[in-house]
Amino acid sequence: MSNVQRYVEGKRNTLLINVLSAVTVQTGDLIFIDKIDDLRVNGNSTANNYGYPAEYLRTSGSSLEINKETFKTYFLGVALDYKDGISGGVDLNIPVSTSGKFNFDLKPARSIFTGDMFGVSGTSTASDLFNQKIMKVTDENNALGYFAETKTGAIEADITINTVYSSKGLV
């Protein structure tokens, strides 16, 4: 699912984050900031402090669990706008919300309780992360925030996010 406005309510603390011209960002994508070398391109990238959707995070030879943990370390927020990736070679700024309540699809569906932790979801066959799907997690190392509601067999849920951005800037 793409270009879904996932914002529900709460203070968004919006930042403008630079995105490379060739990178497509959909409204509702989970975004990370590339602050260290080797986060992308199977561990063959240079840090550029640009924002990327979750699917771009791919460290060298890592497992899905390592990618999830790494994503948490650099999780910036939720994209509030769309960028097509073919903007004529021009890098663009997009608004990213670093706080608030959002509604995301769960993969796989689960029963969740208010206060349970969630993290980014992915495919274990290729260790790829999904841009707009989350999953219930029990490991704080993978947690991007908390569920804001209780549901049985939920296929989507409201969540609140915790990001690497604080009122003092990027941590």
Image (cartoon, rainbow, N blue to C red):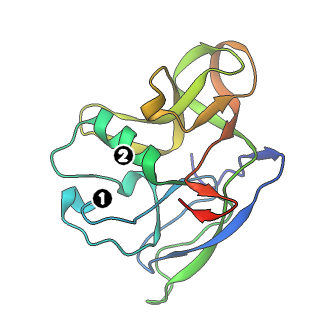
Residue at (36, 46) in percent of width and height: 70
Q: Percent position (x, y) of residue 162? A: 62, 43
Residue 88 shows up from this direction: yes
Residue 77 shows up from this direction: no
At mark 2, the secondary structure is: helix
Residue at (58, 26) in percent of width and height: 117
Q: How many neighbours does mark 1 have within 10 angstroms: few (below 14), some (14-19), or many (20 or more)?
A: many
Work out which quarter of the rendered image holds the N terminus and state it: top right
- Exactly how many numbered labels are in the figure? 2
Does residue 66 appear to the left or right of 81 in the view shown? Answer: left
Does residue 10 appear to the left or right of 1 in the view shown? Answer: right
Image disc number at residue 168: none
Q: Are marks 1 and 2 in contact (CB under 8 Å)?
A: yes
- Please give the residue where the numbered disc 1 appears in the rendered image: 39
Outermost residue, left side: 61
Nearer-the-camera pick, 160 or 127 = 160
Query: Against 59, is 50 above or below?
Result: below
Which of the marked residues, 1 or 2, is nearer the chain's N terminus? 1
Q: Percent position (x, y) of residue 63? A: 23, 36
Q: Percent position (x, y) of residue 99? A: 71, 50
Outermost residue, front side: 168
Q: Amino acid at mark 2?
A: Thr
- Please give the residue where the numbered disc 2 appears in the rendered image: 70
Q: Quadrant of residue 95?
A: bottom right
Query: Against 88, is 144 above or below?
Result: above
At mark 1, the secondary structure is: loop
Q: How many neighbours does mark 2 have within 10 angstroms: few (below 14), some (14-19), or many (20 or more)?
A: some
Q: Amino acid at mark 1?
A: Leu
Q: Percent position (x, y) of residue 124? A: 28, 31
